[in-house]
Amino acid sequence: MTTLSGLSRIPRGQEKLSQVTSIVEQLQKDITEKAFSISEQTKLLEELKILGRDPQNADPIFTKDGITLLAAYGFERKNQEALRCLANAMFLKPQARKLFLDKGLAPTAIGLLKSRDFDDQFLISRILFLLTYESKTDFTSLDKDGILSDAIPTDLRQHAQRYAEVGRQPSDTAIEEMALCELLKLTFNLTHFHPSFVPSLSSSIPDLFDILRSLQGLDPPMKPPANLAVNALLNLVGEGNEDQNSIIFPEDSPSLNSSTLLDLLQQVTGPQDASGLEDVLPSLLTLLRKIYKIAPESVKQDFHTWLLPSDSERDQPLGRSGSLPARLLQLSASSLSEQTRLSISAMLFELSGEDASRFIKNIGYGYAAGFLLAQKIDVPAELLEASETEDGDSVPINPITGQRLDAEPAVAGPPMTDEEKEREAERLFVLFERLRQTGVVDVRNPVAQALEEGRFEELE
């Protein structure tokens, strides 16, 4: 097998260890003697990178001296092959991350993040991203000068401007997209493990939404970097930060950003193959719910229009049309994980003011029952009677299906005989008694009530 680096084959066992040791020693010698040209250094580092892809018999790379050596070539001599080798080592062996931290190299990496070179940005972002998994890494102390807090928003703004200027051209921007993906992953992990960074990174919220708008038309809609931009927003958006409201809901167009996410939700939940929904839907739903909680009333009304069934859909049982609300109802009763299904229902419950009555009127008891049962929310009996729609339509609706009663098909066949009515009454009596004993629904048995009130006539 021939490789670009000049290796005729990939050695194994002791031969591989000897070759790795030899390359490391040559590079260490060159640190002081500077005998190699840049191209010769790069060739040796590329060979080391290839040999280090499998950590077995590549021990010298993962030692304190090995990590220090790679950092010297990557940071001081600005050799990208050294940075690639270093990032691979830190990915393959967590101990390499600890050695990197112990040598005090993290501040140097942070200082190099703000780079207009996308290769450097990609590699430095990955190195810092891997460091976020080290529980003892105190990024707040490492970034005492605020370099990281400034570099990430600056780099994200650069990407947003680039997308706005040239559009998305995958053939021309492969490394740029890779750099953006690593930067977004770093943003998410940093704000997740170190929430103290949220205030300083919140300035990136408009740029993240601009990036999402530039990525419209992806297939599938939530492939990287779109899903990573949503994840990055997750920790930045939240209650209790009044300064965010003007950023998320700009005065000239309050619904601009929320509509971007709602449109993305419509694309994600479309009629295409739903096999990947489990990977992307929960984060998008969580972000939408966070935004709804802090949204002004006008934006909340937009959420209702987008996500709750309209009166025109009640000509048939809810969930039968091809609209976004219908698709959400279908997914809430699908084979998706329980957590995802409950997340859909929870969002619709919040859109109903967290009121069981409005929730049932909005989506029908058939779709609401599972969530209400899981949350142990009592359902008064009167809610299961025909009622008007949430928007005040005077036409009664079926509380179970959400369909207008006047649109329900006429019952075919002859009317029930007295004997059939008696059997049905007995069956309902038993069912209501069982339902009452569960304690979940506060319901009074209508058959028993009829007996008490003298409205039940014994058949001869």
Image (spheres, rainbow, N blue to C red):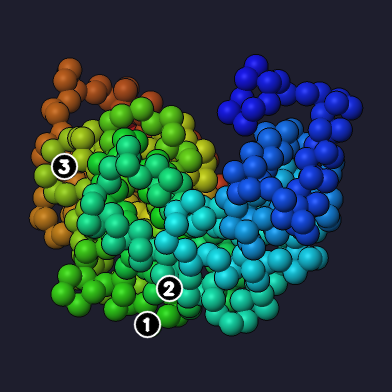
- Rounded to the nearest angstrom, the CA distance separating label 1 from label 3 is 39 Å
Could you tell me how far apart the alpha carbons at marks 2 and 3 are, in whole angstroms?
39 Å
On the image, numbered disc 1 is attached to which residue?
A: 243
Q: How many marks?
A: 3
Residue 329 shows up from this direction? no
Which residue carries the number 2 mark?
Answer: 202
Q: Quadrant of residue 243?
A: bottom left
Q: Secondary structure at mark 3?
A: helix
Picture quarter with the C terminus:
top left
| Residue 212 occupies quadrant | bottom left
Which residue is at a point 66% across and 46% down the rendered structure image? 41
Say what secondary structure mark 1 lies in.
helix
**Disc on the earlier residue, 1 or 2:** 2
Q: Which mark is residue 278?
A: none
Q: Residue at x 78, y 59 (%)?
A: 32
Mark 1 neighbour density, 10 Å: few (under 14) some (14–19) many (20 or more): few
Residue highlighted by disc 3: 313
Instruction: Name the residue at 83% across, 38% down.
Output: 22
Depth-wise, is mark 2 or mark 3 nearer the camera?
2
Closest to the observer: 42 or 355? 42
Q: Are marks 1 and 2 in contact (CB under 8 Å)?
A: yes
Nearest to viewer (mark 1 / mark 3): 1
Task: Name the residue furthest right.
Answer: 14
